[in-house]
Amino acid sequence: MANIKYNRIILKLSGEALAGDRGNGINPPVIKDVAQEIKNIYDLGIQIGIIVGGGNMWRGEAGAEMGMERAQADYIGMLGTIMNSLALQDILESLGVPTRVQTSIEMRQIAEPYIRRKAVRHLEKGRVVIFAGGTGNPYFSTDTAAALRAAEIGADAILMAKNGVDGIYSADPRTNEDAVKYDKLTYMDILNKGLKVMDSTASSLSMDNKIPLVVFNLNEAGNIKKVVTGDTIGTTVEEK
Ligand code: UDP
């Protein structure tokens, strides 16, 4: 039996993780690989909450830059995260993983509304809970939703799966060859150094609630399992 480091987790997947090389939209074969990785830790008995982003569909900021009202543009983004969540639910269930989607914006015909106590009950009963719709508020991000739901459900850690980047660097490793990877950081380091890991609202919320964050590369098979079983990969952010 594998050693388990984190029994209850929030896994944050960006919208990009569901899009594959195309960069936008939903790509079922790509989601299937991600879902299989999730199943592998589900089979270890890990309680899993998932927050899915929506950047593959729409970004509120981009809408605002094109002249839309920011709040309205953000609501479109939140709806994008719900589409992604339904796609992930479908594919997880096709692999035999029981799931529930809970939305922060009520949509009773297609998902449950977010109810914290019910979400915890689902986790205890062995259902993966997909939290859709972000925080339900404009001007926020799904990273903040991850920090918020992690605090609410008492998660042991937030697993932030990145596409093709294996941790937190001093600069963007894709454009700067002098970028240095960090193995360990504190949330204060992220805020002080202005590192682009999660937005500052998400970082300060996780800092205040002392929830560890592990940033790792989603594109290497087995990585989610490595994180929950305590292999040191990626970058761990923890308050000392
Ligand atoms: N969004 C929002 N409030 C939230 C979460 C998301 O307004 O609590 C909107 C926002 O417009 C954002 C979009 O949804 O640009 C997609 O979410 P995000 O950028 O966090 O997705 P990711 O980058 O993880 O794919």
Image (cartoon, rainbow, N blue to C red):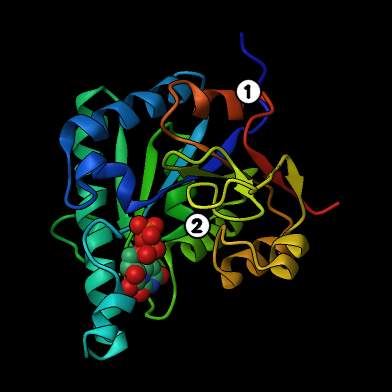
Farthest residue to the left: give it.
Answer: 109
Quadrant of res 82: bottom left
Q: Nearer the viewer, residue 62 or 30?
A: 62
Crowding near the residue tagged with mark 2, few <14, some 14–19, many ≥20 C-alpha atoms within 10 Å? many
Tell me: 192 left or right of 57. Answer: right
Q: Nearer the viewer, residue 136 or 185?
A: 185
Please tell me the numbered disc located at residue 65.
none
Q: Residue at x 32, y 55 (%)?
A: 102
Indicate whether 4 appears above or below 164.
above
Q: Position of residue 160 (x, y in %)?
A: 52, 46
Ligand 1, image quadrant it occupies: bottom left
Indicate whether 83 appears above or below 234.
below
Quadrant of res 1: top right
Report the residue marked by disc 1. 229
- Badge 1 marks a residue whose secondary structure is loop
Amino acid type assigned to the residue bearing label 2 in the image = Ala
Q: Distance from label 1 to label 2 (Cα)?
A: 21 Å
Report the residue marked by disc 2. 146
Amino acid type assigned to the residue bearing label 1 in the image = Thr
Q: Position of residue 227 (x, y in %)?
A: 60, 30
Q: Residue at x 57, y 38 (%)?
A: 8
